Image (cartoon, rainbow, N blue to C red):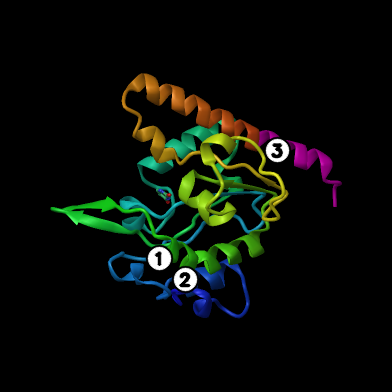
Amino acid sequence: MDGRSAARYLPERLSLKSLREAAAHCRGCDLYKAATQTVFGEGPRRARVMFVGEQPGDSEDRLGHPFVGPAGRVLHEAMDRAGIALADAYVTNAVKHFKFELRGKRRIHKTPKTVELRACEPWLGAELAVVKPRVLVPLGATAAKALLGPKFRLLAGRGRPVAGSTLAAVVIPTVHPSSILRAPDSAARHRDMGKFVEDLEAVAAALSNDLASTPPP
Ligand code: URA
C-alpha cells in the first residue's frame, strides 16, 4: 500500500478559499515537482453542477485555471449548446497537478496512476463536501474511475444517471472533451461533439428537474 496522500495538507476548516490556499502547497505525491503550480477547482460555492476532468493540461498548468486550453474550449462550447452556464458550474479535476513527459521541448500529457489519483482524492472529496453539487459530471475514464471505481464502464454508462451513487443527487458521466479533439477527421469530430452535447443536455435536464422538484426556500 502506497502511503502518499494529500490528507495531511487539508485545512481544518473547509472552505473553497482555505482549500485553494492549502492545495497550493500540496506535496501529497510527487507530481508537484515538475508542474508549475497546483490547479484547483473554480466556480461558485453553491454551484448545482460540478464537472470533474482528469488533470490540468499544459495551458492550465501555465495559467493556473482548470479547462482553459483546447479541451476547455470544447467543454465550454458543449455546455453552451446544452444550455448550461459556465458561471453556474464548478469545474475541477481528479488530479490537481499536470503530469507529463518531455519530448524535446513539448510536454506530453501522461495519464495519472492509481496511486496519484488516490493521493489527490482528499481535495476532490473536500470540494464535493463544500460545494455539495446536485449534479456531478465525471468527464472521461480517469475521472469516472476516481469517482465511480475501476469497474465502471464509461462507454456503456455515458449520458445516463449512475444508479446508487451517493456522491450527488444525480451523477451523469460522459467522455472527456479531449476525446473529441482526437477524432480522426471532421465528420467524426462533428458526430462525437453531437453525442457529447446530448450527454450534457441530459445534465441540463437533470438540473431543471431538480430545480422543479426543490421547494423554494
Ligand atoms: N483536461 C482536463 O482533464 N482538465 C483540464 O483542466 C484541462 C484539460
Q: Nearer the viewer, residue 54 or 113?
A: 113
Q: Amino acid at mark 1?
A: Thr
Q: Give the residue drawn at x 70%, y 38%.
A: 206
Q: CA distance from mark 1 to mark 2?
A: 7 Å
Residue 52 visible to an observer of this rendering: no
Give the labeled residue for mark 3: 206
Q: What residue span does the magenta drawing correspond to? A: 204-217
- Mark 3 and mark 1: Cα distance apart in space: 31 Å
| Disc on res. 183 | none
Q: Up-down: is 206 above or below 21?
A: above
> In the rendered image, which residue does mark 1 sit on?
38
The answer to whether residue 211 is left or right of residue 175 is: right
Q: Secondary structure at mark 1?
A: loop
Q: Is residue 148 above or below residue 191?
A: below
| 74 versus 32 height, above or below | above
Residue at 43 percent across and 66 percent down: it is 115
The secondary structure that most of the magenta stretch takes on is: helix
Residue on which the image places disc 2: 23
Foreground residue among 96 and 41: 96
For badge 3, the amino acid type reads Ala
